[in-house]
Amino acid sequence: MNEYNFQKIESKWQKHWSENNSIKCDINSKEKNFYNLCMYPYPSGDLHMGHIRNYTIGDVITRYKMLNGYNVLSPMGWDSFGLPAENAAIKTGIHPKTFTEERINNMKDQIIRLGSLYEWDREVAAHDKDYYKWTQFIFIKLFKNKLAYKKDAPVNWCDSCKTVLANEQVIEGNCDRCDAVVDQKNLNQWFLKISDYSDELLEGLDEIGDWPENVKAMQQNWIGKSEGAEFSLNIENTDLTFDVFTTRPDTLFGMTFAVLSPEHQLMSEILSISSNSTEIQNYIDSAKKKSEFERMSLTKEKTGVDTGLFVINPVNGKKVSLWIADYVLINYGTGAIMAVPGHDQRDYDFAKKYGIEIIQVISDKNEKSSIEQEAFVGEGILINSGEFDNLESHTEASNKIVKFLKDNKIGTSKTTFRLRDWLISRQRYWGCPIPLIDCDKCGMIPESEDNLPVLLPEIDDYKNTNESPLAKSEEFINTNCPECGNKAIRETDTMDTFVDSSWYFLRFVDPKNQDIPFDAKKVNNWLPVDQYIGGVEHAILHLLYARFFVKALRDMNYLNFSEPFQNLFSQGMINFGGSKMSKSKGNTVDPESYFATHGADALRLYILFMAPPSDGVEWNDGGIEGTKRFLNKFWENIKRLSYLKVIDSSVKDESIVRKVNQSINSVSKHLNKFEFNTAVSDLMKLNNELSDFLKNSQEISKSSKDMIIKNISILLFPMAPHISSEIYKNYFGEDLINITWPQVDNDNLKDPTYELVIQINGKKRFTRETKIGLEQSEVEKICKDDFDMNISDFKKIIYIQDKIINFVG
RNA sequence: GCCCGGGUGGCGGAAUUGGUAGACGCGACGGACUUAAAAUCCGUUAUUCGAAAGGAUGUGGGGGUUCGAGUCCCCCCCCGGGCACCA
């Protein structure tokens, strides 16, 4: 054996795995299937450390499962539609397709260079017409099932990107891509009806397998279910009514005013009957001018205008004033509220500012329930509430009052969600064309399935003005209606790329199917994904949309399960210089350079070793030296081990063989629990033990030598597959990938001696190397003989076998 | 404000779930090899008192339970992430 030449070894094995189709699952198998999936990446061109961490973890799981006898499906593909390719095209004139595919090739090389095993025959790319044909197909099915619709809506418009953004893509009023301020604009847009599944998306989180609690919590927050009541208020002396939603029906008697959002549909009627119409019009105009962010950030000072009109409280007939204020949002609930300043802080602030009456209707037994300084939102009993006095808030009284509303046909119980429908239209070129046709006669008609895919047209200029660049192609726009054959116009918007990624994990099971998006039998056999691995940045958007897609496809009979991802693992971010690595900050660490200087195995080990994989962590350049050193020492140790004189007796090897067995035990446990950092440290410890053994030994038995080299290679294989494959091949002539993970020998786990801790009153006083399995009396004797202790002086002795003895007194 | 995480040496982090706190690695310091450096190897490395043997303190802070607490209970502080005028 020579020096550890990682360059040579790594390229040799990467070639070997590829040429031998080392990972090739039997898609028709029904037994021991394991679908292991890493989130497919946007092809930015270069792998960054986040990818490295993601794919290293994924590859550890793939290889570990393979050696444990699983039929592993491990595919990889590309989330290859999206803005960067298009922006580059505007700048350089290179076609987005050319640009994208160059980057895919580059990134694929790097993924292979990391040593990750993927079944590349199953590769899919969102921009490939063989893929987006089926994205369009699914969209049409959604449309036909009334889960896709078009409507005029105030949308988030980024004037820098010239496109609309989903609510999820607006971060504190700014575009999450370019950071420009997002405006409100009214546009005719496509939506997917995710709100139909609000309840199921929420409840599914309780039934799903192993997902990080924080991801579940984030989705719960996002869906934002709240239960309460809805009832209508009548404007005095008119036949105008509007609905209000409240989660606190128990405070209904405390309503001292009502508020409409400035965008409320009753505005024109109110303007026509209010004596205050000029002021109202001014207020509506000024609210319109404020961006959503401005409105939200002005949390301290609430503004509003009195309509001079009154509404009647339906439970007690009390007349209260009607206001218009922009602290009431049009797109939550009904866009109108009953205001109970005594028990809601926002209403309280407003009432104080405008001198509106504040009534207390809930009282606690202690003085804490005063409403002198602020609203009282705690629990208590109802007061000033007529027949409902003395009921307990919030639940009991709410139930009774809701029942009253129902019985008197005033209102009803109601559940409201924060989750809105998913806006998927993008006025962009590099995305999946929405396959619909607008016919004057027939309306919105889907392209006939035989004509799919609706191909992206070739255009000269990718810049968008105020509509999608697709509109620049006359050839594309002008078509015939699939129903009546008359001239008709194509939809020119493309889809949000999150649509592409909402079903790719289904296509992987059947990637070459020319007739349907995927075969139901195969998908039902392989899904849900057994292990999904990706960054926490997708905790809400991608994961929620994919869950929605699966539920919708299930209801359209394309599959028979409800959740796409049984188990989810979110790896933490790798930072550098205290913040997220990004090209604009110039604080990136390029993984590729480490392939050359340290090797993929050393990089993989360091990535795994640096921290628990779900934690965020700071990149430390010195750290990778440590794993490189470890691999060098490991290589040298195996070499020295192989040179030892072989003898028959294995008596002297017992201890090191037991250490190997202990490592089989601990590495297996840690891998099962995703504790890769401690799995690596187990192997480092074992390597140190091996160094010590080699320092003191000149000879070894054949069986011990084989046992050590064999098992230590297998244990290392999931994490550092190249070096371990090379060693295994050198010694046993076989491909490690076909070997079975070792069983723990439970009879040989415990060391024969341990360090007994002798405590007096709970404090450590002495330690002593001691045989395991001793009775208390034997240990007491040791303490007496060796440490001169007078046992009878103590009141109480606590003995935990093979651990500790504590003398109390 | 609400909901999740988390707080352990100079640093990243371990700790069999109540039983020797600081494994493993990085860094630092000392030594060997070398003309020298790198690489490699051997030591030391929580703080503090002590020449040493040895002692005291120590897991964000304060209380408690226990023979024994990083781990369990109560109160408080700080940091990271998510949501937020959501009625």
Image: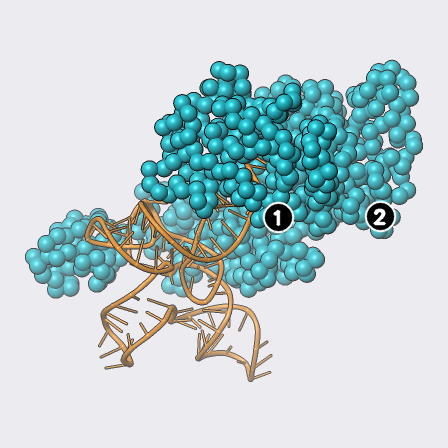
Chain colours: A cyan, B orange
Chain of the residue that carries numbered disc 1 in the rendered image? A
Image-based side of A654 in relation to A559, left or right: left
**A191 shown above or below A301:** above
Report whether residue A655 is seen.
Answer: yes
> Which image quarter is the N terminus of chain A in?
bottom right
In the image, residue A558 sits, relative to residue A83, either above or below, namely above
Residue A726 visible in the displayed image = no
Q: Name the residue under label 2.
A: A90
Q: Residue at x 17, y 51 (%)?
A: A798
Looking at the picture, how far across and down is residue A543, in whole percent? 60, 36
The percent coordinates of residue A718 (x first, y second) are: 53, 46
The image shows residue A176, relative to residue A323, as above or below, that is: below
Q: Which quadrant is the C terminus of chain A positioned in? A: bottom left
> CA gap, disc 2 to disc 1?
38 Å
Query: Callout 2: helix, strand or loop?
Result: helix
Q: What's the amino acid at mark 1?
A: Leu
Which disc number belongs to residue A298? Answer: 1
Residue B58 horizontal/vertical position (percent):
33, 62
Marks 2 & 1, CB-CB < 8 Å contact: no
- Between residue A175 and residue A597, name the one nearer to us: A175
Q: Which chain is indicated by disc 2? A: A
The residue drawn where x is 41% and y is 34% is: A362
